Amino acid sequence: MDLPKQGNSPIFVVGAPRSGTTLLQYMLRSHPRISLPTSESHFFIPLYRNQASFGDLEQVENVRRVLGEMHRISADFLETNLHGMHFDLESLAEELHAEGRHTVQGIIAGLFEKNARGEGKARWGDKTPYYVLHMPKLLEWFPDAQIIHLIRDGRDCALSMFERKHDFKVYNTYFAAKYWQHYVDTGRELGSRLGGKTYMEVRYEDVLADPVAATRRICEFLGEEYSDSLVNYNKSREVGKTPLLQKPIQKENAQKWRTKMSPWQVKVFESAAGDTLSRCNYDVQTSAETLPLPLRALYRLHNNVMSWLFRNVRKLSRR
């Protein structure tokens, strides 16, 4: 099959938390033409919502304000995860202003394009999972962007979220199921409106089972030549990154829920999100019958109480 003409449109990797988006990020950034920073930006949507507050961006001081707000939101990302440039607010504001970057999206694109050039790459991208809830906003700013929605079995996502429960404020299986379902259902519903040239769904398990076939399909979607570098991706040496990124692709990192979830946890998860599991072609082990309302309410109350306790204990510990 002939590939479409290569372009330099942005690439966004999105999905529910703990869906393997970081693995795909590292695979894609190993492509000879594609640059993705090694963390998550998080500032696109806040800047989108507040773009009118920055005033006339033909004024360099207002370009500086946009970059300052980016830094306030994601200082670590800008200082340590852009591998093609050094983030210097003053010089960057002058440079972007001189380039005629007079919109918020133009400033963002200028930043990522500069980083890509510094890496010797032609095309930039970003991996921030929660942008799956805001894909129309991304496309309003970047109409030619392409979006890859990575989907993982929610039961495995739940187990992974429990390992970082305070980060995600997920403290029980029912809440984890509804959390995962919200991301996946919203992403799929929004994606269904976008068309096959803009939006692609990829299952994490398919990437693990046959990474060559999966990445060939992704490259075809992106209009890029396939490269073995995606499968033999550059491993992470960064402290704090998941240990799996320091190893080759781990095919066994799927269906962990079959041995690590209790039968009750499986029942609870499937009662809350079994229909979404089925629509994503995952096996459902139980009847997926909805739990009684009082029990659902109890799970929600438990999650709210645990979240409140952690938040307030942390406040006390800082005093």
Image (cartoon, rainbow, N blue to C red):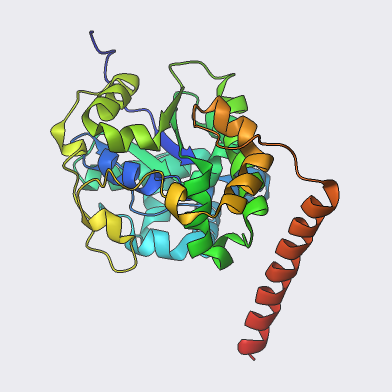
> Residue 227: percent from the left, percent from the top?
16, 30
The image quarter in which residue 206 lies: top left
Q: Nearer the viewer, residue 40 or 240?
A: 240
The image quarter in which residue 247 lies: bottom left
Q: Nearer the viewer, residue 10 or 157?
A: 157
> Residue 29: percent from the left, percent from the top?
26, 42
Query: At 73% from the left edge and 71% from the top edge, which residue is drawn?
Result: 308
> Residue 195: percent from the left, percent from the top?
51, 16
Q: Nearer the viewer, residue 48 or 40?
A: 40
Quarter holding the N terminus? top left
Q: Nearer the viewer, residue 317 or 100?
A: 317
Query: At 39% from the left edge and 37% from the top edge, which residue is drawn?
Result: 204
Q: Is residue 110 visible?
A: no
Q: Is residue 4 above or below residue 13?
A: above
Quarter holding the C terminus? bottom right
Query: At 63% from the left edge and 63% from the top edge, which residue is drawn?
Result: 171
Query: At 26% from the left edge and 41% from the top edge, which residue is drawn?
Result: 27
Q: Is residue 132 above or below residue 55?
A: above
Q: Along the horizontal axis of the image, is 220 left or right of 74? A: left
